[in-house]
Amino acid sequence: MEQTLRTLPVQKHIALVAHDHCKSSLLEWVNNNQAALQPHVLYATGTTGNLITRHSNLDVNAMLSGPLGGDQQVGALISEGKIDVLFFFWDPLNAVPHDPDVKALLRLATVWNIPVATNRASADFIIQSPLFSQQVAIQIPDYPRYLAQRLNA
């Protein structure tokens, strides 16, 4: 598929997701990075979003809980170009019943070429990057062009 450019704005739309065994790590990371996260628009899956709201001074748009469809809601926002960065502290050592949703979420983040952190180290790299507070052009699939070609074929 051909590519086009999308510009991630200075004020990013950020999704925060964490598996149960990683929630405390994400909460600690969020608390350590409140100043950097404050100017951005935050989204999170249900339980994670409610925990962040309760334990920080950040406003979070909470989706459903991951197993109840929250991962898919975040994935839909990614595919609509409404999420710019995904911080997903996932537990690779613990099987979850909604594993297909988790894989779909990570796949969509990859398809739409947004920055993804899956642990504290990668989250630190992203949030401390000078690009985090700048406009950034990324390449994404040119779906409208693809549709036009398919319909005219």
Image: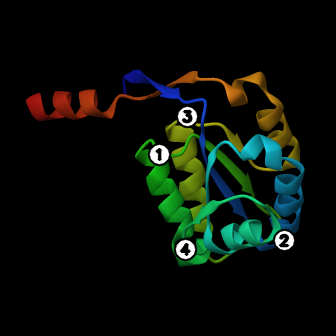
> Residue 6: image x %, image y %?
46, 26
> Residue 140: image x %, image y %?
46, 29
Q: Amino acid at mark 1?
A: Lys
Residue 82 shows which numbered tag?
1
> Element type at marker 4?
loop
Tag in front: 4 or 3? 4
Residue drawn 64% across and 44% down? 40
Instruction: Measure how far apart labels 4 and 3 are at the Cα level.
Output: 24 Å
Instruction: Measure how far apart labels 4 and 1 are at the Cα level.
Output: 17 Å
Q: Amino acid at mark 3?
A: Asn
**Scheme of colours in the image:** rainbow
In this rendering, position of residue 72 left or right of residue 121: left
In this rendering, position of residue 68 left or right of residue 121: left
In this rendering, position of residue 114 left or right of residue 139: right
Q: Which residue is mark 2?
A: 21
Residue 113 shows which numbered tag?
3
Residue drawn 51% across and 72% down? 69
Q: Amino acid at mark 2?
A: His
Residue 64 shows which numbered tag?
4
> Residue 123: image x %, image y %?
80, 43
User: Considering only vertical position in the picture, is 110 above or below 8?
Assistant: below
> Residue 59: image x %, image y %?
66, 60
Instruction: Measure how far apart labels 3 and 2 are at the Cα level.
Output: 27 Å
Marks 4,2: beta carbons within 8 A:
no
Instruction: Measure how far apart labels 4 and 2 are at the Cα level.
Output: 18 Å
Tag in front: 4 or 2? 4
Residue drawn 55% across and 34% down? 113
Answer whether residue 19 is visible to the viewer in this image: no
Residue drawn 62% across and 68% down? 99
Answer whether residue 21 is visible to the viewer in this image: yes
Q: Quadrant of residue 105?
A: bottom right
